Every structure is written in C-alpha cells, then in structure tokens.
Amino acid sequence: MKILPSISGTSASWSWELEPDDDLYLDRVAETAILVSEALQAHKLMDLNQIEVHWLRKGHGFIEIRSVLSNSEGDKADAAELVNRILASRPVRYTDAEPKKLVLSGPGCWVDAEGEEHRGHGLIEVTLFATPGDIDVSLGVRHDIWSWYDFSGNAHPEIYRRNAPRLSAVLKEIEERLGTETIPDEPTYFAIPEQYGIRIYPPNGNGRGFDASGQI
C-alpha cells in the first residue's frame, strides 16, 4: 500500500458562497452537503461516511462537544432526514445550541504514475459554515498529487495528469450544482490555488520546484 505525503492542514482550498432563505437555511445546508458529496462520489474523490457537527451558542461561541453522524457506504442521502439527524444529535445540556459548522469526510481514490488506483481517507475535506443568511462551503486538499511538483520540489507529471483533472472536474461540477462561482482561497506555503486547480509555476535553474518538505 502506497502512503501519500500529507500536511496537517490544507495545501489549497476553494470556496462557494450561498444565501439561503432565513426560515429554511438548515434545509439548504443539508441539500448543499448532499449535492457536494454526490459530486465528490461521482469522481471517486470521497465516499461520505462521516459528518461532524460543531455547535454554537449565541453569545457564548462554540461548545466543546461535537456530534458525529455516520453514513454507511451506499446509503441514499435525504435532505429532510439529514436535518432531523443533525437536530437530534444536539447535546442535551445545550438546548439553545445551533449547528454552525459541518465537516464532511470519507475515503476516496487517487491514481499513481502507473495508473493504479489507491483508496485512502481524507483526500478531500469539505466544511460548511452556516447562518440563516449565509452558507460558506470550503473544499480543501492536503496532498501533493494535485500539483505539478511533489512536496520536495520534484516534478511528477504522470501523477499530476492522472489526478489534477479529476479535482478540476469536481470543482466545476460543484460550481454548477450550487449555481455559484468557485472562489480560490489564499495561497499557502505549499500551493497557489486557481479557480479550478493549482497553479503550475516554472522550475528553478535546477529544473525543480519549491521544496516544501521541511514543513511537512
């Protein structure tokens, strides 16, 4: 089994901004989570198996307790049912807490230079921040398979060609499903995100990219 180098945070991320109806914002949150997870599943980048719910009390901030909703592979998602499951998971001591942040996670497939698929957890992480007037969706990656260079600055064109187009395709599909533009987030130490992927920059005088391995 091949092990992918990864960082603890995100090397690149992209966002989408939605403005839900105030009275139905939880329904829109659930619908959005399902739409995004379906797009990721279609491209074999994530089979959603867990939703982590972070709870906020107005005037107090986030509470320390988080709810974890499990999703069995092959389960058909339903927005109304997901809303009910989220609300039913509210910590009993905090009846005024509201679901503010959802983190979607699960295993996905990446492809090596020889074209062989490998399955691993956490290729993609999706976070939804929700209020009655605003839903921010963020998709982040933490491996170097989406970039022309690996974390050590070595070009790996076959890895790039077999994985980066899949990331680009899913970013475009999420944009289409949500009906709002994909926004690349700020550059990081590891990568510069563009609208549908990660920027390819020219090599240095030694034919290499930036060596970020010291920060892994």
Image: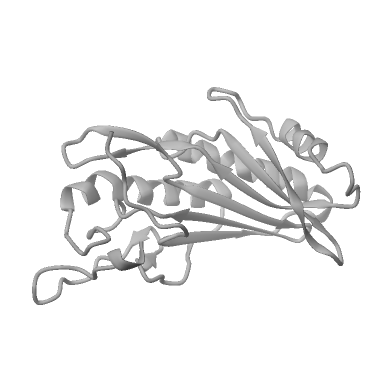
Q: Residue furthest left?
A: 206
Residue found 27% across the figure and 61% down from its top: 151
Q: Is residue 164 visible?
A: yes
Of 79 and 192, nearer the camera is: 192
Residue found 62% across the figure and 43% down from its top: 33
On screen, residue 196 versus residue 48, left or right, reads left
Q: Where in the figure is residue 34, as x and y percent of width and height?
A: 60, 38
Residue found 45% across the figure and 36% down from its top: 107
Q: In the rendered image of this protein, does residue 72 appear above or below residue 120?
A: above
Q: Is residue 181 visible?
A: no
Q: Residue furthest top?
A: 74
- Residue 154, by quadrant, is bottom left
The quadrant of the image that shows the C terminus is: bottom left
Q: Where in the figure is residue 121, as x and y percent of width and height?
A: 44, 39
Residue found 54% across the figure and 50% down from its top: 126
Q: Where in the figure is residue 184, as x and y percent of width and height?
A: 45, 65
Q: Where in the figure is residue 78, as x and y percent of width and height?
A: 68, 30
On screen, residue 102 versus residue 186, left or right, reads right
Q: In the rendered image of this protein, does residue 137 appear above or below residue 188?
A: above
The quadrant of the image that shows the N terminus is: top left
